[in-house]
Amino acid sequence: MRHIKCMAAKGMIAGAMAVAVAAMVWGCSAGRTEQDPGTGMESPAGMDGDGQAVTASRQPSASGQGSAPDYVDDFYNAVNHVTLGGWEIPADQPEMSWFRKVREENYNKVNDMIQKVSSGSGTGSREDGGGTPAQSDTGEIRDQENIRALNLTGLDREAREKGGYGQRAGEFLNKIEDAGTVGELLSASLRFQKDYGIYSLAGLVYTGDSDDSSVKSLYWLKPDTGLKREVWFSEEESNKKRVEEYKQYLTRLHESNGLETREAGETVERVTAMMKDLASSSLKIEETYDAKKTNNVYTARDASAIYPEALSMELLSGIYGIREDEKTVVAEPDVCRKLGTYLTEDNLPLLKEYVKTCLYADLSAMTDMESLNAAQEYQMAVSGTEEKKPFERTVSESVQQELGFQCGRLFCLKYFDDDAKQDVTDIVRKVIDVYDRRLADMEWMTETTRSEARKKLAAIMVKVGYPEQWPQDRYSLKLTAPEDGGLYVDNILAIRKADQDYMFRTKDDPVDRMEWEMTPQTVNAYYNPGNNEIVFPAGILQPPFYDPEGVPVTNLGRIGSVIGHEITHAFDTSGSQYDEKGNLRDWWTAEDKQRFEELAAKVVDYYDTMEVNGTKINGSLTATENIADLGGVSCVTEIAKDEGYDLRELYKAYAALWAGKYRDEYLAYVMTNDVHSPGIIRVNAVLSATSDFYTAFHVKEGDGMYQKVENRPGIW
């Protein structure tokens, strides 16, 4: 299972599928009940109680108070002092940053279109739009009809209260209750996953084969552990609190489904004990990025044998239509084996409780108001937010998540200019050209490996703006409006079913390399190793990330560094395991691989010495992103020197991009669970490792930004 590499982290919407967490649409996040605090997370700049960033080397005065630190002591705060001092975190948000601000702008733009469509006044996309994404009148009309139906059914509180879990999920709950054997429970659970992509005990999906990226293979999903291993077994007080808040949240869900408080609490204790036990056999977060650990190939029959007889090949074949000898990849077999110890008839009552608990959490934001309130209050508790999001916003966010590409087409028609697409594509090509020159002169690589690296670089596919073919045009989707009896949860599950049906219907087709894993209005970017592609959605191609009328050196320091970051992911400790076709293949000589691993270890050691708000950076957890940050800035530095740009302005532009304020609870979570380093580290650590920065700002020994030459890591 291949992870795509994003410029900034993303959060999960309660009960909803996360988009593009892995290189598949409904991948490992599909059945997870864990909810990250807030949505649309990006890597934070570390903050203390009053908003001040703190590093291991220096503790400057509070942001926005007193004088700014010197550039040579704390570059991040020197550049962002005024910005941070003027920002307040919204009461219903866990942080404030440029990512958040632009995402908020995009949310408002899309929300405005959603409300206009729902009221029958259109979107204004044709009159006002500058973009020309491929589309048809029929496709745009169908998008608007589905957006209207989902939004209005979401806003219909009375229908949601009366409808409960709706027809589809309601039938599944009845089957759970009626299951007389573990086999019957597994059958019901697997059929629900096959139809709707939501799972608990197990699940199967088709996605690009890591060994041959042109075809699809069957991937086995691990059971739902509720929270990550890093949370369940953490000694950090913030994570311990998160566990207790999670239990309280699940208890409330069981209460809203008819259990008395004591019985609900006892049920949750049993279920979460099982989840924690399963998590004990999970891979660490950083290990999930290592294909050598996750590309475990079986036949379907051998994969089913990981479990006891309850999960038979006959059951799998009957539900999914798979063959005994079909290639099957089990990313985390140890967790599956652990689950197998629970699949006994004596455990049937516990397994029923577990499956229902997972479903309650997965659907909590799309059913009754009590469940929604429980989900929101849980989010508040673990993220430190002071207010719940307004009800109308929870619905609009869900519409923008579930119908992301439908909203994206309208967004691009109205707000995206194709001139920007060409301009950014030109910048990408310039960065690739410089990167190629750097590879050609890479002293630590032999010619054999260097040639393979340059071949991979030349083959990178570049996607900018929006997809050439909109995914919703590949199949029919018609949601039911409230006036026709439509129910919110049923409409959402209808969307999921359309996606699932398409995935299974096309499982034998070649991989469509033109598909996107991220919606065009998203403020982010990513590298997908399985496609060897870098993708820059329209949402990030606006100020402050990119300004078509902006100063070239500023654009280079911002969108240019983002581009360099994503390209470097092709050569980080994870992406470097894949070749120019996106296949998992060792293209390194033994000598070069050893040298690369030594350089990567130096990056890990370098970041391990740093801390934010008293918490040390986990250099292993953040290694791939740190390598990408270092490579991106190194590349744009060379371009700036070639173009005769002022390096001081380049580095200021880069640093400004990562300004951010974060609530303590939110920061504590991402510090131990996010593969991205906090923003202050992405600025100060990267520039302290960049020799040209020392020259540009006359940094000397004794300054806060100073690192000894031998301690400065660098690979690309």
Image (cartoon, helix red, strand yellow):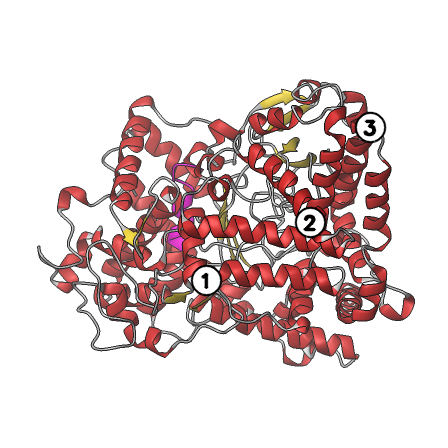
Task: First in sequence, mark 1 or 2: give its number.
Answer: 2
Q: Amino acid at mark 2?
A: Arg
Q: Check the picture and name the quadrant holding the N terminus.
A: top right
The numbered mark at residue 262 is 2
Q: Pick whichever, 537 or 501, lies toward us.
A: 501
Using residue 173 as the reference point, say whether residue 52 is left or right of it.
left
On the image, the x and y values in percent for residue 166 come to 84, 55
Marks 1 and 3 in Cβ contact (< 8 Å): no
Residue at (36, 79) in percent of width and height:
86
Q: CA distance from mark 1 to mark 3?
A: 58 Å
Q: Amino acid at mark 3?
A: Thr
Q: Quadrant of residue 180?
A: top right
Q: CA distance from mark 1 to mark 2?
A: 58 Å
Which of the two marks, 1 or 3, is nearer to us in this view? 3
Q: Quadrant of residue 335?
A: top right
Near mark 1 (Cα within 10 A), the count class, few <14, some 14-19 or many ≥20, is: many
Q: Secondary structure at mark 3?
A: loop
Residue under pointer 3: 181
The numbered mark at residue 424 is 1
Q: Say if 542 sits above or below 187 in the image.
A: below
